[in-house]
Amino acid sequence: MAGRRLRILLPLILAASCAAGCGPKRAYYWGDYDSALYSHYANPQDSERYLERLGQIVQQAEVEKDKVPPGLYAEYGYALFEAGRLDEAVTYYKKEREQWEESRVFMDKMIRNTQRLKENRPGPAPGGNLPPPAGGTPGSAPSAPAPPGDAK
Amino acid sequence: MSRRGLLLPLLGFLLLCLGCAAAPPKKDYTAFRAADPRSILVVPVVNNTTNVEAPGLFLSTLPIPVAERGYYVFPVNMVKRVLEDEGLSDPNLVHAADTARLCNLFGADSVLYVSIEAWTAQYMVITTQVTVEFDYVMKDGKTGDTIWKEHKKIVYAPQQQSGGGSPLASLVAAAVQAAVTKAAPNYMPLAQQANDQVINTPGVGLPAGPHNKEYGKDPVSAK
């Protein structure tokens, strides 16, 4: 009977331990990054909570040197951007660029675009309608903010 | 004695054969090593199932294992949104787009394309069988050539046998469990398990990237 029990339990235990973070220890601090992402997909309206959770992960990851995972600063920066906090967005794009050489091309474009958007913000942009940076419906607008580059 | 002496090695041999058959053939990593990517653009996943939540859920499981393998992984949600702004809100369009152009846009060395082939919960009388199946393809940003690919299917069915105790009791327990699974079939551990096996299995997985201590040392990339 104990054997049977074990047979039932073992896969469950394995699955559970997998969920808790399979295998060897991680190189970076991820916190609940994956679950923050998927709750954001499941419930896109709740962008404040998403921003907050990413912020907490960034804070935790920064406690130890070299623990901030690739993409985290940029992801947080983009969430700030979507909340209309453009200056802070640029700050985090710069952090990403500084920590990860691989991100340079992308971050340069995003920084440039964000700054351009900021400069244009006070008045009506000449020859262009400026969409609000936050809350755009996904995929709705070809005129959405911050295309990363010249997509001919 | 002689009988036993014969049987045991035979059994051992058979087991060995089984083991051999089960081990997947070693991959050719020539193209991968030639490309030697430092960064991976994980693009939104194509969904070949009817489950609408699957792509978002699954995309969120990808960056951690890939980054932990030693690569720079572009921020998946930001990439998804930027692609949407570029008019590529349909992952099928992203997957069909020119790899080199896509990489240019982000300054990426390679792209990881993943599609979901199965994401189902099959409700049976006393248990629920959950199946996930994925197709992974990685392409070089310069040539657009496929440099690595893998396929994974995982089927999970909690084994519920009416043993021990009263048969009725275990039947009730199984029914309860099926109901729980039915309410919210938990695909995430299975998806994570699939990723882990696909990425970290020596000989077939993703070779260690430049940010991993094993870079250039693991048997996969040494071969």
Image: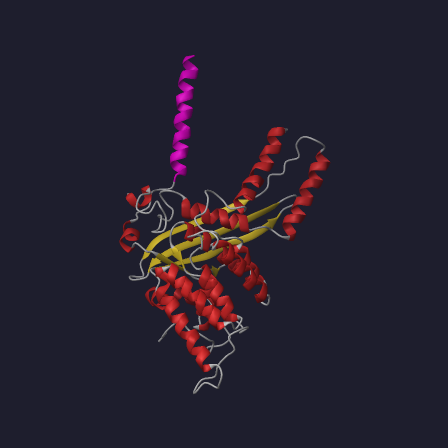
Q: Is residue A55 left or right of residue B102?
A: right
Q: Residue at x 37, y 59 (%)?
A: A100
Position of the C terminus of chain A by quadrant: bottom left
Quadrant location of the N terminus of chain A in the rendered image: top right
Above or below: residue B9 compared with residue B66: above
Where is residue B211 drawn, in percent x and y? Answer: 36, 51
Q: Residue at x 54, y 51 (%)?
A: B188
Q: Which residues are magenta?
A: B1-23
Residue B84 coordinates in the image, percent (x, y): 46, 70
* Viewer-closest of B16 and A9: A9
For image coordinates 39% across by 30% down, the residue present is B16
In the picture provided, is B96 more to the left or to the right than A19?
left
Q: Is residue B7 above or below residue B40?
A: above
- Percent x, y for residue A19? 54, 47
Identify the residue at image location x=56%, y=53%: B120
Asked if the magenta segment contains residue B14, the reply would be yes
| Residue B68 on image: x %, y % | 42, 50
Residue A148 lies in the magenta stretch = no
Picture quarter containing residue B86? bottom left
Number of labelled discs? 0
Residue A49 or residue A44, whichever sits in front: A49
Judge whether residue A119 can be spotted in this image: yes
Residue B53 visible: no
